Image (spheres, rainbow, N blue to C red):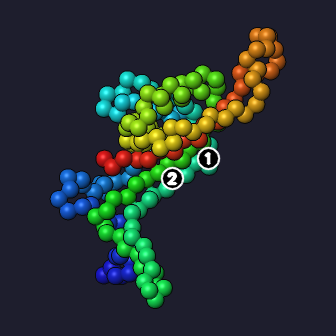
Amino acid sequence: MVDPRVQRELYQPEISPGSTLTPMPATDITVVNRTTVLLQYPFDVPTTTLTLRAPELSNTIAVQAQRVQGYTRGNTLYQYRDPNWFKTRLFSWTFTGLTRQNRIDILNFVLLSAGQYITVTDYDSQVYKCIITNPDADITQEGPDYAQLPPNSALPAGSLYTWKVDLQKALV
């Protein structure tokens, strides 16, 4: 017999009644590590692809659940969350060591895909339908620009850039 306390902790997906979604199969997700991240636009039939090296290890993935929260006159906190309300998944990635050409490609990609769904293939080969939530994010320069040096110089060609992007996963 299964202990009832353990039974409540088993995975049970929240799927709205009448939804066409089905729960994940009981098999594990296949994870294939990659050294790059792909951003593709448009979502349906990608014609523009941006390939960047994998982000820093300090990236974050957060789940944001919609809920109602308030206080009564007696200063009692109450919170309510309907299981039929949706949850959103937020990604925050920092890409470092980008080249000048990467910077130009990022600016063009963000200008082209602003406010539209894009396809994101992350460093674990998982594919998401996302929207860039901070298209006005700065691309910061990490060092001096060595592009004007002679070709036989011992210093690295070009400078390195950093881009912090926030993505919101769409409900698919």
Q: Is residue 20 left or right of residue 43?
A: left
Side of 82 relative to 75 (left or right) = left
Q: How would you rate the neighbour count of disc 2 (Cα within 10 Å): few for under 14, some for 14-19, many for 20 or more?
A: few
User: For this rendering, which residue is in front, 74 or 56?
Assistant: 74
Q: Residue furthest left?
A: 18
Circle number at residue 61? 2
Q: CA distance from mark 2 to mark 1?
A: 12 Å
Instruction: Please name the residue shown 28% across and 57% down the image.
Output: 23
Q: Position of residue 18 (x, y in %)?
A: 17, 59
**Residue at the spot 42% in from the left edge and 79% down from the top edge:** 78
Please indicate, yes or no, whether residue 132 appears anywhere in the rendered image.
Answer: yes
**Three-letter code for the amino acid on which mark 1 is drawn:** Leu
- Where in the figure is residue 84, as x and y percent of width and height? 28, 64
Drawn side of residue 135 relative to residue 4, left or right = right
Residue depth check, mark 2 versus mark 1: number of the one nearer the observer: 2
Identify the residue at horizontal 82%, vertical 18% (top origin): 154
Front-lying residue, 20 or 8: 20
- Of the 4 image quadrants, the one containing the N terminus is bottom left
Whether the residues at callouts 2 and 1 have beta carbons within 8 Å, the answer is no
Q: Residue furthest front?
A: 73
Residue 123 location (% of width, % of height): 51, 40
In terms of depth relative to the viewer, which is nearer, 61 or 82?
Answer: 82
Q: Which residue is at 31% across, 69% downward?
A: 82
**Image quadrant in which you'd find residue 87:** bottom left
Q: Is residue 14 visible to the viewer in this orientation of the structure?
A: no
Give the number of the disc on residue 57. Answer: 1
Q: Secondary structure at mark 2?
A: strand
What secondary structure is marked by label 1?
Answer: loop
Callout count: 2
Q: Check the image and report above or below for 116 versus 28.
A: above
Q: Amino acid at mark 2?
A: Ile
